[in-house]
Amino acid sequence: MATIFDFSSRQVFVFGGTSGINLGIARSFARAGANVAVASRSQDKVDAAVAELVELGSDSRGYSLDVRDPEAVKTALATHSEYAAGIDILISGAAGNFPAFAKDMSANAFKSVIDIDLLGSFNVLSAALPYLVKPGASVINISAPQAYLAMPMQSHVCAAKAGVDMLTRTLALEWGPMGIRINSIAPGPIADTEGFRRLIPNEKIAEQTRRSVPLQRFGASSEIGDAAMFLCSDAAAYISGVVLPVDGGWSVAGASAAALAMAHKPQGK
Ligand code: COA
Ligand code: NAP
């Protein structure tokens, strides 16, 4: 797949980069010449992702860890940065989601998503800071439309991703003077992903959702990769602290309606 971007010899680290959207981002950077490291919990997923990225020409390494464990995150970043001599591009995208009404969630259920998405992002970002190339590094947090659109059965994700976007904004203030840019990408419904399968469980809801996207189609992980490469390129050198929806216009037209249709399906339909 041709790309207009050139990230030759750049060092990229993608947390949660072993499947779905984040693996799509990792592939995009690898195809553009970067060396891409990935991390997630499952050693099998880490091994498979690394093998695929190496096939694409990347000098890749993988780390099996849980972003809820700050010491494990620190160790992986220290080990990798010694090998790679620093990190040019950091993507923080590890996340968990399940549809559940707030009334049906235990405190631990709500906390598990806050711990992975929000606290996990803080763990990754704060542990990476010493190794980010200064000036010049670019950081992307993977957010979601739930950060700014209230959705039923998503109170945990809405709270967590809204927090992630405020981390993006506050760290843009704190890290800007060091020459580090940080932005969020909020993907819309992206086909063939775990998040999509969990929230859009059948054909009928898929069709309703597809029609609620102004561009009338689902997105592809490669399109999130394209947006990530743009934000990390020199073409975005003056962009920091933004939340970029990459969603076919979904966030301005009907995402809440689609989620409501899922949660409150009329009887007999
Ligand atoms: N409804 C209500 N509560 C639920 C739930 C559901 N559908 N699924 C899990 N929970 C609760 C569990 O019961 C548990 O609470 P409890 O201890 O009070 O019983 C809590 O959430 C944590 O569950 P557990 O399975 O121990 O968490 P985990 O840390 O192993 O896994 C998840 C985290 C739950 C987010 C899991 O779905 C996951 O690993 N997801 C990653 C993949 C993913 O979600 N991809 C989409 C990306 S957005
Ligand atoms: P996914 O394939 O399940 O991606 C989640 C990744 O994070 C996996 O690599 C997973 O691997 C890893 N992960 C999960 N919990 C972790 C933990 N505690 N520690 C370390 N790694 C962990 O799902 P996806 O749908 O592509 O979602 C990717 C990102 O896009 C998420 O941030 C999600 O919120 C966002 N998003 C998705 C959509 C969509 O349509 N899919 C829309 C908007 C936003 P392991 O299981 O090996 O840990």
Image (tube, rainbow, N blue to C red):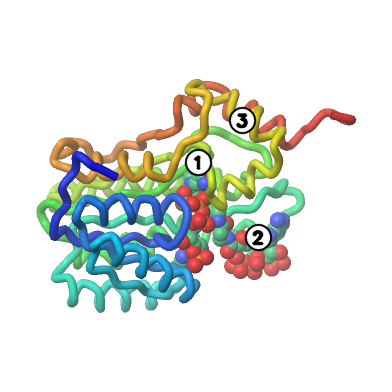
**Horizontal and vertical percent position of residue 228:** 30, 44
Q: Please state which amino acid type lies under the numbered disc 1.
A: Ile
Mark nearest the camera among 2 and 1 is: 1
Alpha-carbon span between mark 2 and mark 1: 25 Å
Residue at image location 53% in from the left, 21% down from the top:
253
Most foreground residue, 116 or 9: 9
Q: Is mark 1 within 8 Å of ligand 2?
A: yes
Alpha carbon distance from label 3 to label 1: 11 Å
Q: Is residue 150 above or below residue 168?
A: above
| Vertical arrangement, residue 240 with respect to residue 12, above or below | above
Q: Which mark is residue 190?
A: 1
Find disc 3 in the rendering and name its residue. 209
Q: Is residue 213 left or right of residue 51?
A: right
Q: Circle 2 sits in a helix, a strand or a loop, which is it?
A: helix
Which quadrant holds the N terminus?
A: top left
Quick one: SS at disc 3?
Answer: helix
Relative side of 96 to 17, left or right: right
Q: Does residue 206 appear to the left or right of 177 in the view shown?
A: right
The quadrant in which the C terminus is found is: top right
How far is the residue under mark 2 from the one under mark 3? 26 Å
Earlier residue among tags 2 and 3: 2
